Image: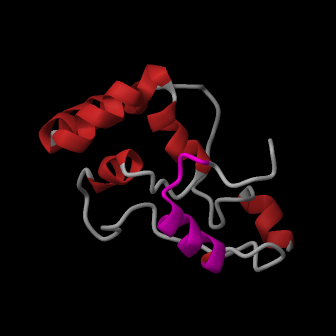
Amino acid sequence: GSGKPDPAIEPGFREKLDKLCPLGGDENVTGDLDATPKLFDNQYFKDLVAGRGFLNSDQTLFTFPQTREYVKLFSKDENEFFKAFVEGMLKMGELQSGKGGEIRTNCRVVNSQALDV
């Protein structure tokens, strides 16, 4: 809320983000969520511990006291992350809202709106 960069972000990584997403630049730019974007591993959590969370909401997982210990655990123990991931996917698969859903062609808008653009 200060208008200044998040002090939790590692300065070199912040410079990289500033170049990728300059103020007034293309708002549809995408970036990698971690240093190993083509691997399913625990690098995401290692990056958060090092202050290299791509999104502020990601970095908050490390700075927020209630989730910090999970981030630290998953950054050190990839098998614990895999185990928790499986458990979470199984729980999400059991969720039933009774409403239809969709796989979006553009994650920012529902498909019916995306077709109108």
Instruction: Tell me how many marks there are.
Output: 0
Residue at image point 25% right, 43% down: 75
Q: Can residue 86 be seen in this view?
A: no
Residue 45 visible in the displayed image:
yes
Q: Residue at x 70, y 74 (%)?
A: 28
Where does the C terminus fall, quadrant-wise? bottom right
- Asked if the magenta segment contains residue 4, the reply would be no
Residue 17 location (% of width, % of height)? 59, 70
Point out residue 63 in the picture as x, y percentages from the top left corner: 50, 34
Helix, strand or loop for the magenta stretch, by majority: helix
- Foreground of the two, 100 or 33: 33
Residue 36 image position (x, y, % from top left): 30, 67
Q: In this view, does 26 lie to the left or right of 18?
A: right
Q: Is residue 113 above or below residue 26?
A: above
| Residue at 17 percent of width and 34 percent of height | 80
Q: Give the range drawn in magenta.
A: 7-19
Which quarter of the picture shows residue 68? top left
Q: Which colour scheme is used?
A: secondary structure
- Up/down of 72 relative to 45, above or below: above
Above or below: residue 79 compared with residue 111: above
Q: In which quarter of the image is the N terminus?
A: top right
Query: In this orientation, which residue lies closer to the viewer: 33 or 12?
Result: 12
- Residue 43 % position (x, y): 28, 55
- Residue at image position (56%, 65%) is 14
